[in-house]
């Protein structure tokens, strides 16, 4: 796999069109906070964001003292990262490459993370092996991935005929249980549990946000007083935390398999 075999023209405006309702706005912000907080809780050092997009999370880590590196194949997204870094006066280093072939030495990173991007990669297994190769034995790999079999998707599928009949179908063009066309696989909890393969061990996993894009949920939140809507979103998020199978996004933390574990296997 090389840079020439992946989408090097990715831009955010290819992704979502239309109105952003409070549930989706909350999910994006909460996912970003969750990824940053999870990485920030690990041993500080050299961090790499793979599929970094505009690098909004990375600049926050850079401002906390991390040595921050970004990888993305899209020149446009790297340009956005440059602007994000300049605006925040944060020093981030940008590399045009793909997750499947990372130009970093073995054991040279403290944390490798990937937010909302793994399901865009051509070969997730190749990326996970690369991540395992380049983290230090004490390092960690953090993956934040959309869950397309969460409660919103399960309920949405059931409610679909009713939603269409009653015209309550704000996302009928793209039912939330269907993966968008630029995704290469469908993320869900059973799949997340297998991501580490033979190289990484799952240390922790938790859910972020609940019910995002369920028919009517975003519209209801928009009608409610903002304080009540915010409280509902945070309560749902707390419920999702211990139920990754039901949540909208799953954050998982992985450690490399140790030498004794390799010897024993
Ligand atoms: C949905 S965006 C997510 C960006 C960012 N991580 C975020 O959470 O906002 C997906 C990103 O993955 C990048 N991407 C696609 N294929 C890739 C690959 N094979 N290796 C690394 N990044 C890739 C795209 O260029 C894009 O910037």
Image (cartoon, rainbow, N blue to C red):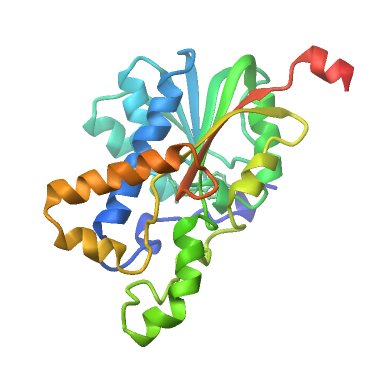
Query: Residue drawn at (56%, 46%), measured in percent from left and top?
Result: 118
x and y percentages locating residue 148 in the rendered image: 53, 57
Quadrant of the rendered image containing residue 35: top left
x and y percentages locating residue 182 in the rendered image: 52, 62
Looking at the rendered image, the quarter that the C terminus falls into is: top right
**26 and 227: which one is in front?**
227
So how many labels did they put on this image? 0
Quadrant of the rendered image containing residue 15: bottom left
x and y percentages locating residue 212 in the rendered image: 37, 56
**225 and 4: which one is in front?**
225
Q: Residue furthest left?
A: 225
Horizontal relation, residue 96 to residue 99: left or right? left
Quadrant of the rendered image containing residue 67: top left
Query: Residue drawn at (35%, 46%), measured in percent from left and top?
Result: 236
Residue 102 appears in the picture as rendered:
yes
Query: Residue drawn at (58%, 22%), measured in percent from left and top?
Result: 140
Residue 31 appears in the picture as rendered:
no
Q: Is residue 138 above or below residue 207?
A: above
Horizontal relation, residue 196 to residue 82: left or right? right
Q: Is residue 247 above or below residue 68?
A: below
Query: Residue drawn at (30%, 55%), measured in percent from left and top?
Result: 23
């Amino acid at each position: 796999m090389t840079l020439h075999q992946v989408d090097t023209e990715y831009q955010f405006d290819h992704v979502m069109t239309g109105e952003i309702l409070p549930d989706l706005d909350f999910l994006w912000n909460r996912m970003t906070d969750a990824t940053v907080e999870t990485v920030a809780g690990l041993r500080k050092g050299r961090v790499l964001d793979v599929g970094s997009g505009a690098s909004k999370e990375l600049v926050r880590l850079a401002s906390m003292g991390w040595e921050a590196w970004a990888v993305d194949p899209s020149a446009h997204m790297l340009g956005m990262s440059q602007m994000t870094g300049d605006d925040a006066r944060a020093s981030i280093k940008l590399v045009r490459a793909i997750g499947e072939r990372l130009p970093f030495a073995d054991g040279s990173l403290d944390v490798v993370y990937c937010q909302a991007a793994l399901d865009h990669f051509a070969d997730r297994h190749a990326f996970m092996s690369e991540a395992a190769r380049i983290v230090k034995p004490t390092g960690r790999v953090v993956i934040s991935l959309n869950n397309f079999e969460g409660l919103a998707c399960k309920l949405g599928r059931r409610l679909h005929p009713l939603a269409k009949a009653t015209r309550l179908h704000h996302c009928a063009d793209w039912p939330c249980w269907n993966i968008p066309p630029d995704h290469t696989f469908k993320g869900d909890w059973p799949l997340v549990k297998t991501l580490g393969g033979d190289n990484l061990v799952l240390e922790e996993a938790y859910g972020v946000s609940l019910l995002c894009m369920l028919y009517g949920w975003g519209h209801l939140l928009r009608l409610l007083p903002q304080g009540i809507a915010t409280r509902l979103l945070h309560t749902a998020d707390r419920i999702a935390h211990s139920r990754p199978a039901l949540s909208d996004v799953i954050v998982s933390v992985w450690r490399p398999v140790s030498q004794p574990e390799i010897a024993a296997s």
